[in-house]
Amino acid sequence: MMTRMLTLALSLAAVATPAMAAESENATVEVRIDDLDLTRTADRERLDTRIKIAARSVCRSGLRGTAERARQSACASSAIEKAGLQVARAIAQARNGTQLALLMIDNTTR
């Protein structure tokens, strides 16, 4: 079976408070998956790790304090949760012989 390479830009929205949205620009992080075989458990675990790292990255503001750490944690958790459906689609496509190249995670609100 021939594997097709596609680039998929999936926006995984994270929660951003209105104050945070006013203070910073929207950030986007690419999660490369073209080197993963999502039909394999080990590679799906690698993807989960990459998504967690990307979610923390797009939610990081550089600000300090307990409230800000809590906001960043909630933002990252939301981004990871919202990524679930898109990851499931990428896995399903891999099982059908289509290898996707990347996922996009951003911190915009919807």
Image (cartoon, rainbow, N blue to C red):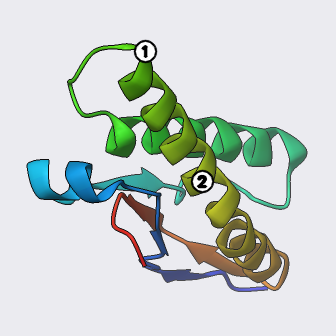
10 Å crowding of disc 2: few (<14), some (14-19), many (20+): some
Percent of width and height locating residue 35: 55, 51
Percent of width and height locating residue 98: 67, 82
Percent of width and height locating residue 71: 45, 36
* Label 2 residue SS: helix
Is there any visible trace of residue 54 in the rendered image? yes
Q: CA distance from mark 1 to mark 2?
A: 18 Å
Q: In the image, what residue type sits under mark 1?
A: Thr
Q: In the image, what residue type sits under mark 2?
A: Ser
Rendered view: 69 above or below 32: above
Q: Which quarter shows the N terminus?
A: bottom right
Percent of width and height locating residue 47: 65, 46
Q: Residue at x 88, y 45 (%)?
A: 41
Say left or right for 65 vs 101: left
Q: Nearer the viewer, residue 74 or 60?
A: 74
* Tag of residue 78: 2
> Which residue, as the protein is rendered here, is positioned at the far top?
65
* Label 1 residue SS: helix
Rendered view: 28 above or below 59: below
Say left or right for 23 vs 92: left
How many marks are shown on the rendered structure? Answer: 2
Quadrant in the rendering for residue 94 = bottom right
Q: Which quarter shows the C terminus?
A: bottom left
* Tag of residue 23: none
10 Å crowding of disc 1: few (<14), some (14-19), many (20+): few
Q: Residue at x 74, y 82 (%)?
A: 93
| Residue with the mark numbered 1 | 66
Say left or right for 97 vs 52: right
First-in-chain label (1 vs 2): 1
Q: Nearer the viewer, mark 1 or mark 2?
A: 1
Quadrant in the rendering for residue 22 = bottom left
